[in-house]
Image (cartoon, rainbow, N blue to C red):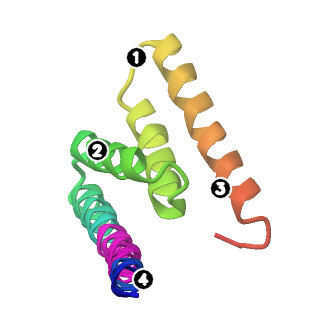
Amino acid sequence: LPSQKRVGLLISILLLSTLSLVSSSYFDDKVDKNKSEEAINAYLTKGNNALGSGNLHSAGRSYEACLRMDSDQRYCLINYASVLVDLNAEESDESMKQQRTKKAQDMLTRVLALHPNDGD
């Protein structure tokens, strides 16, 4: 009987430990997701501020960083596509213009595929 009590106690401890780990992992995932969303929004805001001040290259780098964290982030895709088109205005290399235009079109096509009912 004493060994049965020990086994029961050990099982209870294992169950509590498992529940603790599972709930800890659940909350860690939520914290990580919130941190990622904060970083994505920070890159988006930084890109928007740079775009607003006419610094296209800085804006592009911020949107690229945003897209490295979330390749489907709608506003980073849209704004980066806009930057690529705007950069073409100061570009003399036709090959580079075509590459940027293609990349911008691909990004906008992706946004439409991800959000077909979205008018943005």
Q: Which residues are magenta?
A: 13-34
Could you tell me the amino acid type at mark 3? Val
Disc number lying in front (3 or 2): 3
Q: CA distance from mark 4 to mark 2?
A: 71 Å
Residue 101 is left or right of residue 15, and the answer is: right
Measured from the top left, where is residue 40 in percent x and y? 33, 62
Q: Which numbered disc, 3 or 2, marks the residue that appears first in the sequence?
A: 2
Q: Are marks 1 and 3 in contact (CB under 8 Å)?
A: no
Is 91 in front, or is 112? 112
Is 80 in front, or is 37? 37
Q: Which residue is mark 3?
A: 111
Measured from the top left, where is residue 27 in percent x and y? 34, 79
Could you tell me the amino acid type at mark 1? Ser
Q: Which residue is mark 4?
A: 4
Q: Which numbered disc, 4 or 3, marks the residue that appears first in the sequence?
A: 4
Disc number lying in front (4 or 2): 4
Q: Are marks 4 and 3 in contact (CB under 8 Å)?
A: no
Local crowd at mark 3 within 10 Å, few (<14), some, or many (≥20)? many
On screen, residue 55 above or below 115: above
Could you tell me the amino acid type at mark 4? Gln
Give the SS element for disc 4.
helix
Q: Which numbered disc, 4 or 2, marks the residue that appears first in the sequence?
A: 4
Q: CA distance from mark 4 to mark 3?
A: 61 Å
Give the SS element for disc 3.
helix
Q: Which numbered disc, 1 or 3, marks the residue that appears first in the sequence?
A: 1
